[in-house]
Image: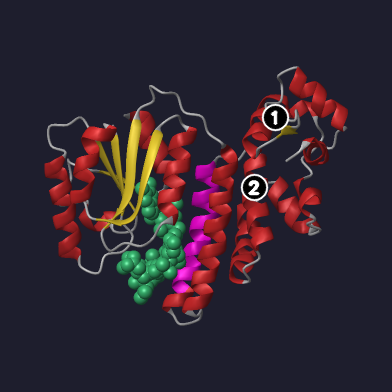
């Protein structure tokens, strides 16, 4: 955003934006030509401390969204009302609406883990269920997940998180054969917002290939996302192998996703099961 966009977003004059940046209240980047540029994270940081300085966030005017009811639901963080709208927008591939809902909630100060657990997850679950019952075609399901993925990626890009050089690190990946990537993107964003440098190795990674990375990246946490495996025996073997690989290292192993339920009894003391993004935060704070 340039100064004009930021002014429109917060309902103030461009001169006020300049004053706030000069006073170091509102962070920004400056282009070589001296223009101020703002990311959502800059605005979010400012709003967290200076909410009293503005009346409301006009994100919707900025994005040209005229749906008064939707704006009201976002402003009052009404997840039960937002779920059907988000669902419909995902099915209709309405990228603007999907991005605006996610961004709007974030700018209202809602934690990412809450947005993901209370909105994105239930919507994706219903999309999966409808596809399973043949009520949605595979293309509709792919398109819906693609618009949601794009909105989450975009939000991540605009966070511009800075991580200190001495930060602890984590590696996240999904096990071989598992192509579901949304949880991995979410995990990286949430951990990095909490100061943990996170390497998202991506989807369908054979655990053997992680071994070489351990010396290089020296992670404190390994996070597996396991949402699909055609063969239960295989996943148990993979996790067993990983547990052997990290034996004697001070690495905490977290497993999240639908399949974690299935493997938790086998590896009781060796892994920590996370049920959702909020659970991830909770477990990290306890470690
Ligand atoms: C989008 C999607 C896809 C997309 C993925 C696109 C992408 N780039 O990621 C595509 C189209 C590729 C796909 C493919 C397939 N999919 Co699919 N897919 C989904 C869908 C609709 C959403 C997945 C998603 O991202 N959800 C958002 C996440 C955050 O929610 P979640 O996964 O439920 O996770 C929650 C918790 O479990 C936890 N969690 C999950 N993972 C993790 C990880 C960590 C680290 C943590 C902390 C927490 C956590 O947090 C969430 C709550 O906040 C789900 C439906 C559903 N129930 O979610 C089906 C679903 C996962 N897919 C399913 C299936 C069957 C398939 C296919 C086999 C379909 C096919 N025949 O081709 C293939 C398999 C591909 C493969 N080899 O992996 C099944 C899996 C059933 C199973 N467990 O065996 C589901 C459940 C649909 C269904 N109801 O049948 N899929």
Badge 1 local density, few (<14 within 10 Å), some, or many (20+)? few
Q: Is residue 122 magenta?
A: yes
Type of secondary structure dominating the magenta stretch? helix
| Residue at screen point 88% across, 32% down | 13
Q: Relative to 261, does residue 215 appear above or below in the rendering?
A: above
Figure quadrant of the N terminus: top right
| Residue at screen point 68% across, 59% down | 97
| Residue at screen point 62% across, 50% down | 102
Q: CA distance from mark 2 to mark 1?
A: 28 Å
Residue 180: % across, % down: 39, 60
- Give SS at disc 1: loop
From where the camera sits, is residue 137 visible? yes
Q: Which residue is mark 1?
A: 32
Residue 151: % across, % down: 58, 54
| Residue at screen point 49% across, 70% down | 142
Q: Which numbered marker is on residue 103?
A: 2
- Give SS at disc 2: helix
Badge 2 local density, few (<14 within 10 Å), some, or many (20+)? many
Q: Relative to 276, does residue 97 appear above or below in the rendering?
A: below
Figure quadrant, ligand 1: bottom left
Toward the front, the furthest residue is 33
Q: Which numbered marker is on residue 186?
A: none
Q: Relative to 13, does residue 253 appear above or below in the rendering?
A: below
From where the camera sits, is residue 267 visible? no
Q: Nearer the viewer, residue 287 or 107?
A: 107
Residue 20: % across, % down: 77, 23
* Quarter holding residue 262: bottom left
Residue interval drawn in magenta: 112-129
Q: Is residue 233 magenta?
A: no
């Amino acid at each position: 955003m340039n100064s004009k966009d930021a002014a429109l977003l917060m309902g103030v004059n461009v001169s006020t934006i300049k004053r706030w940046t000069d006073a170091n209240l509102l962070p920004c980047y400056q282009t070589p030509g001296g223009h101020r540029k703002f990311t959502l994270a800059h605005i979010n940081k400012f709003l967290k401390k200076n909410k009293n300085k503005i009346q409301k966030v006009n994100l919707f005017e900025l994005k040209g969204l005229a749906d008064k009811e939707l704006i009201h639901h976002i402003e009052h963080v009404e997840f039960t009302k937002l779920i059907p709208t988000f669902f419909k927008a995902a099915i209709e591939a309405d990228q603007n609406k999907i991005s605006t809902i996610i961004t709007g909630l974030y700018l209202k100060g809602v934690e990412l883990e809450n947005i993901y657990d209370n909105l994105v997850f239930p919507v994706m679950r219903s999309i999966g269920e409808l596809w399973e019952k043949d009520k949605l075609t595979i293309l509709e399901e792919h398109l819906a997940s693609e618009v949601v993925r794009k909105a989450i990626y975009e939000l991540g890009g605009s966070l511009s998180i800075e991580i200190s050089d001495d930060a602890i690190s984590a590696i996240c990946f999904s096990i071989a054969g598992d192509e579901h990537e949304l949880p991995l993107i979410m995990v990286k964003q949430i951990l990095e917002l909490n100061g943990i440098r996170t390497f998202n190795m991506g989807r369908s990674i054979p655990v053997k290939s992680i071994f070489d990375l351990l010396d290089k990246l020296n992670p404190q946490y390994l996070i597996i996302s396991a949402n699909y495996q055609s063969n239960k025996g295989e996943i148990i073997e993979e996790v067993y192998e990983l547990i052997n690989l990290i034996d004697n290292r001070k690495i905490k192993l977290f497993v999240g996703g639908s399949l974690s339920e299935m493997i938790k009894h086998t590896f009781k003391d060796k892994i920590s099961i996370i049920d959702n993004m909020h659970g991830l935060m909770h477990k990290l704070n306890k470690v």
